[in-house]
Amino acid sequence: MKKTIFILSAILVANISFGQMPDKFVKAMESKIALIDSTHTAEGYTDLANAFERIADAEKNQWLAYYYAAYCNASAGTIAGAGGDMMAAKADKTDPYADKADKQIKKAEELAKNNSEIFIVKKMIATLRMLGDPMNRYMTYGPEAQAMLDEAKKLNPDNPRVYILEGQDKFYTPEQFGGNKEEAKVLFEKAQKLYDTFKPETSIHPNWGKSQVAYFLSQYK
Amino acid sequence: MRPIAKTLFFILFLAITNLLSAQTTITGKVTDKKNPLIGVSITLKDTYDGATSDSSGKFSFKTSEKGEFILTATSVGYRHFEQTIKLEGKGILTIDIVLKEEVTELSAVVLSAGTFEASDRKRAAAVLNPIDIVTTASAEGDLTGALKTLPGAQQVGESEGLFVRGGTAAETKIFIDGTLVNNFFHSNSPNIASRGRFSPFLFKGTVFSTGGYSALYGQALSSALILESIDLPDRTSASLGVSIIGVNGGYQALSKNKKSSWGGAYSYTNLAPAFAIIKQKQDYSEIPVFHDGDINFRIKTSATGMLKYYGYFSKSNLDFTEKSIDSLGYLDRFGVSNFNTFHNLSWKEKLGKRWKMYAGISYTFNQDDIKAGMKDANKNEVILSGLEFKTFDLDLTSNYFNGKLIFERRLKGISVIRFGGEYNYSDEKSDYTIYNGQKFPARLKANVKSVFAESDIYITNNLAAKIGTRLEQSSLIDKTNIAPRFSLAYKLSKQAQASLAYGVFYQTPESRYLPTAASNLVFMKATHYIAQYMKVTSVRTFRAEIFYKKYDNLIKTGLVSGRDLAINNNGFGDAKGFEFFWRDKKTIKNVDFWISYSFLDTKRDFMNFPYATTPNFAAKHTASIVMKKFVQAWKMQFNGAYNYASSRPYYNIRFDGSKYYFADMGKVQDYHNFSVAFNYLPSIGKENAKNFSVYVLSISNAFGIKQVYGYEYSYNGLRKEQIVPPSRIFVYIGAFFSFGIDRSQQTVDRLF
């Protein structure tokens, strides 16, 4: 009897915490999310983005699947556009990723409004757009990226990813444009501290970034 | 019970393992028929199962689903693929997928013959960005100034407007949001090119057609400049500017729901400080002063609909004297005061799935009060005998109304058909008062009604055609015309394409040579033939074009009671040439430059020309080099431009009582202009900076090279004098601030 009650309550708890997430969905998501940290190529991220998109399209009402699809496409685009002359135009390479990510994050936003994590990805997409043609786009996408980040911070000031992205911008921007590696360090440390207290809602809610913080902080040693 | 339980457990175990092993492997290869496609997402529809194709186009995945399923394959730039498959829970299913290229605006060939585009849209024809227009050193922040660095346009400095491929400035018409603009430039003064009224930052898209343009536009023999105004601003902001020529301020408010905005701006221009430093050829009794104000609102009427209003008010005044060429020791006086207001309302909306509608109306009221005369050395007004005609008052009052309605229906893929109508109404009144007070009033009301239809047909991604026709009826000459237009584009490779264009263009004779006693005037006519080759990569653009343009029925003028009026349509002419454009953002590190070259061979017999010859606004060779470099360490942008035009001819055309003849002719020296501009942006990169500032220093004709545009002759034909710019060098210094925003477009809105 005791056992039955325990199992029942466990199921109940699981049901509450996962909301309307079917078990199959959570498992599929978990297996793919586990791969994110070990992915470092545009192809790898595209593969993951496609997998998340499949899950998203099959489920249709899970914002997290669209969110991860958009996140992976934005990451794939950022890697595809990296290297070479930073200021050179390469929109033909990066825009297809941004276009896909845009569509997916819009779907995620329809399902989950006013979500800090979604604005994090929107910030990444704006930065990716700028990367496509910095000389001509910094005036439109620069402020947009900043606005998205501001919104993410407003919605959840304890979201560590806000400070990773902010720190990244500070880290990579040349000093004469307002970049500052020391200020970046403060932000990375803040993010690191927030990870100690940050608890994702479920096992499949966004919790990425820890390894990035570790990487950036290792650059100071 | 125990053995039963065991058996049950065993059965259950078997069932589970069976379930686990009951999988189908789906494998295959994705190609576009020729090459493997990488990164294609293959999905078993409505399941989580699927894969992404690898570098050799191969994919493979397992599924435990059973029954009929749909396998899909998707990739950007390709058509969606679907195939029904049957899964039996075992074995290997091999499915090779061939994806067909999707005809999209991004990948399709562009109907680009004769067209230069400045826009954010990533299209082959888009050779410039909106920002390029204001950062072109020789443009002095003027829209048409930047377009003059593109092939096809002449470096004419003595009057405003775009002289395209052997055509006059009147042969270029300018459209804002689809409707005609009647007084695009400020009122002109003799031999001084006036600036455009509208800030280049009002426009997000500029299409400069140097020939063969769409049937949606008409009444321009040579060229159409099609401007698209900006949509909602990014955020609420205020701006302020101070410069050597005046002050300006503006405010733009974006509503909370970001669905509408309103704003206004005012600028006060007074050239007194500039003229105190930079000596002018003219001696001003009233230094040019301009008050320009504008108001606007923009409302998002639906997800795809937008209603825009732009209203403009301007008042300006100037008065100067120059040494008279007609009588030594005396001065010629010229003064003009102008009031202009322009209102444009446009609405675009998607009607259902396949239909789009575009509607626009514009109204212009323009009033010029021109005073001309002669003064003696002490600046007292005088009337010299034999030169009485030089003293007059001319009051010009005009009202213009333009309306346009276009419907667009999507056909298969991205092919579309458009049709609609246009109505242009003008009411021009002139009151001419000669020296003795005698008045000669005249008034001309006219309208042009047009209907048009055109279709963009994309046969494949690589082949597209635009076929159009325009029908125009002009009340002034009571004639109707039919103008066919046709263009074809073929994609040679991923980056290169070839295009052809043909079109017939009609224009009603200019009203300044009307009203006339001559009856039976007809439309002036131009026929364009254009062939183009273009290769575009993300960092380089190469474009070569050859053209032939034939003019028929040009207006010939004659002296009718002292005025040059249209007498018949016996004029004709032609223009042929070739042009190159090369833009390169890569070869020189951090330097973006373009080079354009035009060769023009043109002759025409029009107006009062005694016979067909090269007109005085046409140079055989025209070239420009424009470069831009941003030095990050200094937060400074360096812009330079060099414009060249080979010698233009000049003529003294005189009337011997029965006919016109060339009393004198010659060629002016070559034209050179080196211009530089420095923009300092100290707040760039300062995060959360609420104020953003830009400091500008620009120098036109920096080396002070003498520029001669032509010659003017005294009334008796005995003396001639060079037509030169008001000053050799012009220096512009300004500072611009914007508030409440960081790094926004709005800041640069007030750059000039």
Image: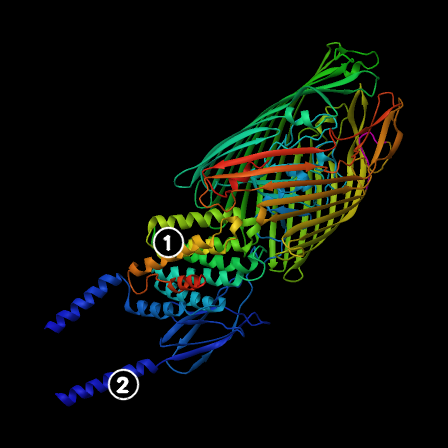
Identify the chain of the residue marked 2, using the numbered disc in the image. B
Outermost residue on the left side: it is A1
Residue B319 lies left or right of residue B422; in this view the side is right
Frontmost of labels 2 and 1 is: 1
Residue nearest the observer in this picture, B499 or A143: A143
Residue nearest the observer in this picture, B374 or B220: B374
- Residue B342 pos. (x, y %): 57, 29
Give the residue type at disc 2: Leu
Residue B670 lies left or right of residue B255; in this view the side is right
- Residue A136 pos. (x, y %): 57, 49
Identify the chain of the residue marked 1, using the numbered disc in the image. A
Residue nearest the observer in this picture, B744 or B18: B744
Q: Is residue B503 magenta?
A: no
Residue at which label 1 appears: A109
Residue at which label 2 appears: B14
Q: Secondary structure at mark 1?
A: helix
> Within 10 Å of the Cα at label 2, are there few (<14), some (14-19), or many (20+) other Cα atoms?
few
Give the residue type at disc 1: Glu
The quadrant of the rendering that contains the C terminus of chain B is: top right
